[in-house]
Amino acid sequence: MPTATESKGVTHRTLEVNGIKIHVAEAGDGSAGGTVLFLHGFLELWHSWQHPLMSLSSRGYRCLAPDLRGYGDSSAPPSPSSYTIFHLVGDVVGVLDALSLARVFVVGQGWGALLAWHLATVRPDRVRALVNMSGAFIPRNPSVRPLQALRRLFGDGYYLLRLQEPGAMEAEFARMDTRFIFRKLLTTRETGAISLSPEWWGPQDQDIPLPPWLTKEFVHVLAAKFDETGFAGAMNSFRCLDLNWELTAPWTGAKVTVPTKYIAGEDAMSYNRVKEYIHKGGLKRDVPGLEEVAVIAGAGHYVHLEKAEEVTEHIYEFIKKF
């Protein structure tokens, strides 16, 4: 049975689904006729969605924001092989079933967007419409494994390759102050081949001023929770990239047909690296349900945080059509 506590208009409950426990933050009564499910990105938590959660719930939507498997107050199985994309999709479907929700609007960012693309591919019957940001659709290449492709693009020092050995990057993180980690991650625009390397982090005593959209409280909440849980659960999902490639072979060439909007920060590497794919027909070819693309000026990878009000309006203006 779910357990729930309430604070600041948000209900927190724990659901037993798919053999584990998933923590879900919830707001709103659904009187507008729909539920919105928010899926957070890498090294984030449910609370990254606080602004759209409160804004859309005030407009009559029921809003749900889980901590994904391995994060926050959700279970973190010890084995990396327990974090395949099908485990994660199963968790999402389990949450919907536990709450008797047949179809929902889905909003994903970064890693959460990758999860949402897969959800919409294998269970389109559960997705009313999709808004994804910062992580464009990646069609499966049957001839190249993901880690091999990353190695060709960025070299062996790339963080997604270095974290494949369980415990190695966790040990690197343990040598740093967690608040410093999140100040650096959330504010830098310097991403690429050396991301999350010692030279990329730089000295821990460096002054990293917080931009207006990022508060000390937000950083503290993230740091405190990851101090409690560690980073292994968050990293384990990326340790399944090649395994996911093997498991998703039956869906090679599958399209995303649900109504979709894609949002990107103008300055994000995750956008600029695939800009031609997004704007010159590639994304529409693979996502026939694509109806809108919005590029947010002055924003980077964390567009949902940097431009929270603008992004929330984009979400609202899209989902209210359905």
Image (cartoon, rainbow, N blue to C red):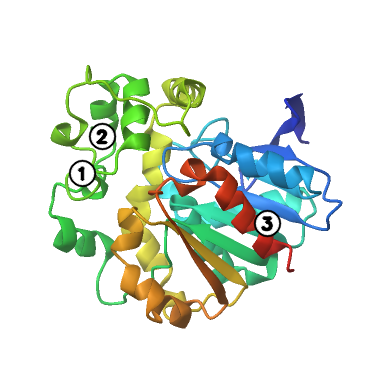
State the separation of the CA atoms marked 2 and 3: 38 Å
Instruction: Residue type at mark 3: give it.
Output: Tyr
State the separation of the CA atoms marked 1 and 2: 7 Å
What is the number of the mark on residue 95?
Answer: none
Quarter of the image holding residue 281?
bottom left
Q: Tell me where residue 144 appears, x and y as whole percent.
A: 24, 71
Q: Which residue bears the numbered disc 1? A: 162
Mark 1 and mark 3 lie on one chain; the one further toward the N terminus is: 1
Mark 2 and mark 3 lie on one chain; the one further toward the N terminus is: 2
In the image, 140 versus 261, the foreground residue is 261
Question: Do callouts 1 and 2 mark residues in contact (Cβ within 8 Å)?
Answer: yes
Q: How packed is label 3: few (under 14 Cα within 10 Å), some, or many (20 or more)? A: some
Q: Tell me where residue 128 appears, x and y as whole percent.
A: 70, 66
Q: Secondary structure at mark 1?
A: helix
Q: Tell me where residue 53 appears, x and y as whole percent.
A: 67, 42
Say whether residue 16 is visible: no
Residue 235 lies left or right of residue 291; in this view the side is left
Instruction: Residue type at mark 1: give it.
Output: Arg
Q: Which residue bears the numbered disc 2? A: 169
Instruction: Residue type at mark 2: give it.
Output: Met
Q: Residue at x 72, y 39 (%)?
A: 26
